[in-house]
Image: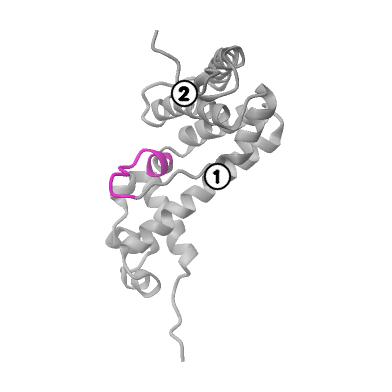
Amino acid sequence: MPRKFMFTREEIISAALKLIRRGGMSALTARALGAELGTSSRPVFGLFKNMEEVQTEVVKAADALYQGYLKEDMASGKYPPYKASGMAYIRFAREERELFKLLFMRDRSGERVEENREEIRPLLEIIKRQLGINEEAAYCFHLEMWIYVHGIATMLATSYLEWDEGFISKVLTDGYEGMRARYMKGGQTYGGNTNGTPDKEI
């Protein structure tokens, strides 16, 4: 007869997320997870091979939460879709600080991180349509804007600053409009340079 477990995998991951929200990723240990569930660590290892597997599933769960922010904000109509994606990223950093750090501020040196443009394909299509630029220019535009958005988000996640939504919205608009003017003036290829090479330093 198959063994009946006290908890489901989903309940264990939910408890793990609670631990991380309170104390960061370092708070997620087998003993702490068992205590959060009101038991020993035994039920955890009945459903997961080890803590590494728990951590992997926690990252997936945190990413699902972030994707929910993204989908909600882009569908709300409060901001234009591309701007809404940046505002969602920043809102996630403000409201889920430890989960934001887990997803976007952890050490990735031991991971194999590969570029996947298809993950941002909807955003690239928006940029291409709005600015009338080609694929490479749209990709570079997005990278530059993402660095801008990520900077604001990390300062909020680490309590370096506390800007309200209205000011953040203004800052993102200013950054977008400045880059938009440069890219539309410079042409439709990489870095705004019509010959397909990066602009010279000025």
Q: In which image quadrant can residue 177 be found?
A: top right
Say which label, 1 or 2, has the lower sequence index: 1
Q: How far apart are marks 1 and 2 (CA)?
A: 19 Å
Q: What residue type is labelled 2?
A: Tyr
Q: In which image quadrant can residue 130 be found?
A: top right
Of 60 and 179, the residue lying toward us: 179
Q: Is mark 1 on a helix, strand or loop?
A: helix
Position of 50 with respect to 186 (left or right) is left
Q: Is mark 2 on a helix, strand or loop?
A: helix
* Colour convention: one colour
Residue 119's mark?
1
What residue do we see at 36% from left, 57% from top?
55
User: Disc 2 marks which residue?
Assistant: 148
What residue do we see at 71% from left, 31% from top?
77
Asked whether residue 144 is drawn in magenta, I would say: no
Of 83 and 135, the residue lying toward us: 135
Other-residue count near label 2 (Cα within 10 Å), few / some / many at <14 / 14–19 / ≥20: some
What residue do we see at 51% from left, 27% from top?
140
Of 37 and 169, the residue lying toward us: 169
Position of 164 with respect to 134 (left or right) is left
Q: What residue type is labelled 1?
A: Glu
Q: In this view, does 197 lie above or below 6?
A: above
Q: In this rendering, which labeled residue sits more in front, label 1 or label 2? A: 1
Q: State which region is magenta.
A: 100-111
Q: Position of residue 111 (x, y in %)?
A: 33, 50
Q: In which image quadrant can residue 39 be found?
A: bottom left
Other-residue count near label 1 (Cα within 10 Å), few / some / many at <14 / 14–19 / ≥20: few
Q: Position of residue 191 (x, y in %)?
A: 50, 21
Residue sitting farthest toward the top = 202
Position of 167 with respect to 131 (left or right) is left
